[in-house]
Image: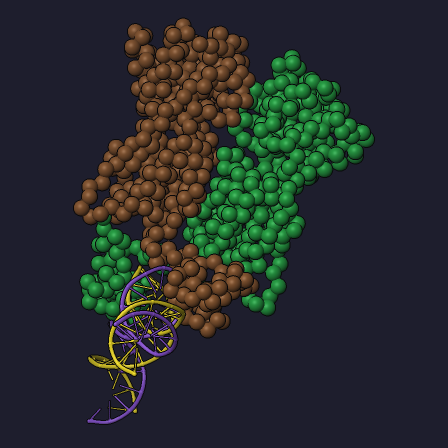
Chain colours: A brown, B green, C yellow, D purple
Amino acid sequence: MKRQITLKHIARELEVSISTVSKALKNSEEISRDTKEKIQAFAKLYNYKPNNIAISLKNKHTKNIGVIIPDIVHHFFTTVFRGIEKYANSRGYNVIICVSDESFDKEVINMEMLANGSVDGFIMALAGETQLKNDFNHLREVTEQGVPLVLFDRVTNEIQCDKVVINDTEVAYQAVKKMIASGRKRIALLTTENFFNVSKHREDGYRKALMESGIEIDEKLILALPFDESIDDISPFLDNVNIDAILAVNEVFAIHAMGIALKKGLKIPEDISFIGFTDGLLSKHSIPSLSTIAQHGDRMGEIAAQMLIDRAENEIGDGEEETYRTEVIKATLIERESTNF
Amino acid sequence: MKRQITLKHIARELEVSISTVSKALKNSEEISRDTKEKIQAFAKLYNYKPNNIAISLKNKHTKNIGVIIPDIVHHFFTTVFRGIEKYANSRGYNVIICVSDESFDKEVINMEMLANGSVDGFIMALAGETQLKNDFNHLREVTEQGVPLVLFDRVTNEIQCDKVVINDTEVAYQAVKKMIASGRKRIALLTTENFFNVSKHREDGYRKALMESGIEIDEKLILALPFDESIDDISPFLDNVNIDAILAVNEVFAIHAMGIALKKGLKIPEDISFIGFTDGLLSKHSIPSLSTIAQHGDRMGEIAAQMLIDRAENEIGDGEEETYRTEVIKATLIERESTNF
DNA sequence: GAAAATCACGAAAACGGTTTCGTGTTAATA
DNA sequence: TATTAACACGAAACCGTTTTCGTGATTTTC
C-alpha cells in the first residue's frame, strides 16, 4: 500500500524546497515558468492531493458541518438532511451526521464528539428527551465558544441562535378551518406528548380554528400519545369517541387511524376525513390516499445549511453584536382522497 | 467569542512547558503529583478539549468513516446507515455521509472530496449509473492507496474488497416457491432495469423457483421498469396479463400494484397475492398489510462498519497479502395479509 | 561600472497536539 | 563523600500545509 504523496516527497524528488512546491502548485507568480511546469507535471503524474487535515489545522476550519437529528429512519428528517447535504456540498462542505435517538445523553455525547474542532458548526433538531428535560447547556457551551448553531423544527427559545421552523400553528389552523368549512363538526386531534414545540404549536392551531368557529373544544377528542410507537392506543380511543374528522401530527397516526376506521366500515372521506403531517410514501400510496401537510424538508435543510455556512464564513468582529434570524417555511396542504373540501 | 483553549495557553498560564501539560493531562508517571493536579484542575476549569484535527494530523487517522449511498430518503439505506452509525459511534468513530443521487459523477466527486485524508475508509452502495457504466476506477484508486473499502447491497465483482450482501437469489426463490406451494401458477415479477446486481439476483431466484416447479416462464409476466419513479407503467401492464401473484423488488411497486388490483375489484390475497422487498412503513401500514422480505439493513450496516473499522485499525504489513470477505445476510420473509400460505 | 530593482527560490514559523531524548536537581547507594 | 539512580520537567522533532520574510543571483537603471 502506497501512502498518500506529500509536498515533502515532491520536494525531495525534484530537489527543491517544500515552499517552492507549495507555491508552484498554486500557480504563484513567484515561481518561474519552468519550475512550475516541472512540479505540476510531477504532481499530476503521482496524483498529488493536498491533505485536508493539514489544511484544516492551518486554516482553523474544517469545511465539515455536524448534523444531529433524533432519528434517521424518518421521512421528514431525511428530506431535511437531503437539503442540507445538497447545499453544503455545493459550497464544498461535507456533512457529519449523528443520531441522538431521541436521547438527551446521546445528543450531548454526539455534540462533544464533534465540538473539538471536527466541524465548523451544527445543525440540529432537538431530541425528545432534551425538550422534556429543558436542559440546553450543551448547546449553550458551543454557542458561547462562537461555534455557529442552527436549530430546525424542534427548536427552543432558551438558546439564541439561527432557527428554521415551519408555520405549524398556522397550517394546522388552516387545515382544521378547511375541515370545518366542509361541514365537519367533531374533529379529533392525534398528537404526541413529548415533543413539545411542534406538537404544541399544531395543537394551538387546532384549538384556535375550533374556537374561532364557535365549536366547543372537547378535550376527549384530543389523544396525546407518549411515543411514535404507541399507535395501539389509537384503536380504543376511536371506539370511545364520536367524530367525523381527524387531524394527526404525523403520517403514521393518520394512516393507522384510517385503517381502523375502514375496518369499522366507515367511508372515507364521506363519514370521516383525515389530514396528516409529513408528505411521505405512506400518504401518497395509502388507499385512500391521505391528504397531508407537506413540510418541505428539502427547503428547510437548504436554508439551514445556508444560514450556518454564511455565519461560519463570516468571522464576526469582536465589537459587533450577533443578531439571529428565525426563518419560517410555509407548509402546504396537499389534498388527496381522504378529504373532500 | 472565546476561541478553544489549547495546550499552549495552559502552559503559558501555569508557567510550565507544553510537553509537561500534555503529559499531565494524560496522567503520565513522569509528572509529579502536584503539577498534575494543578494542570488537570486548570484544564477542567477552562474546559480544555484536545483539538481533534491536530490529533488526526499526528496519528494519520481521523476516526471518521465515509458513507456514500445513492439516496437518503429511502427506507433500506437509512436502516443500513443507522446500523453503521450506531456501531461506528460505539467505537469512537464519526460518520460522514454523501449522497450520490444515483449519479456516477456525483459518486466520483464525493469520493474525491473525502479521499484526501478526511476519512479512514469508505462504506458504499453503488449508484445506479455506476453499475450501468461499469466504471469503477474511482474505487480502484482508493483501494490501491490502501484506503479500506466496504461495499454493501449494490456491489461489483470488479473490485476486490470486503462486501456485505443479502441472499437475494435464495430469498426470492423461497418466496416464489411459497407462492407456488399455496397454489399460485401465474406469478408476475415487478423489477427495475438499471440496478443490475440486486434486481438481477432476485430475478434469478424467481426464474429458478418457477423452472424447478415445472412452470414455464412467461416473459410477458416480467416487467422491468427503468426507474423507481416510473410506477405509472404498472397499471397498463396489469391490464394485459392474467396473473394470481406478484413478486416486487421493492415496497412501492408492490403497494402500487395492490392498489390497482383493489380498484379492479380483486380480492387480496384470495384472487391475487403479493410479496415485496423492504420491510418499511408501507408494508406494515398498508391495507391489506404487505408480506415482505426484510433485508435487515441495521445488521448489514453494523457488519459493514465492523469490517471497515477492523481493517482500518489493522495496518497490514507490507508482506502480507490482503484477503477479503463477503458476508451474506440472510433476508427473511415476513408474512402479512397480502399472502395466505 | 556601481547602485538599485527584480527574480526565483529557501528558511522558518505557525496550526495544536504527541513523543523521544536530554538535563539539572534531588535522593539513594557504596 | 563521591557515584549513581530516580525524579520532574523542558527542548525539539514531527504530522502536512501555508505564508511571511529573507537572500543570492541576475538584470535594469543612471
Q: Pick out the residue farthest to the left.
A: A319
| Quarter of the view holding residue A222 | top left
- Quarter of the picture holding the C terminus of chain A: top left
Residue A242 can be seen, yes or no: no
Above/below status of A211 relative to A100: above
- Between A318 and A269, the one lying in front of the other is A318
Residue A62 position, x and y percent, is 37, 51
The structure residue drawn at horizontal position 69% and vertical position 28%, both measured from the top left corner, is B223
Above/below status of A56 relative to A78: below
| Quarter of the view holding residue A131 | top left
Residue B251 position, x and y percent, is 59, 29
- Between B210 and B51, the one lying in front of the other is B51
Residue B244 position, x and y percent, is 71, 21
| Quarter of the view holding residue D6 | bottom left
The structure residue drawn at horizontal position 43% and vertical position 36%, both measured from the top left corner, is A83
The structure residue drawn at horizontal position 41% and vertical position 21%, both measured from the top left corner, is A332
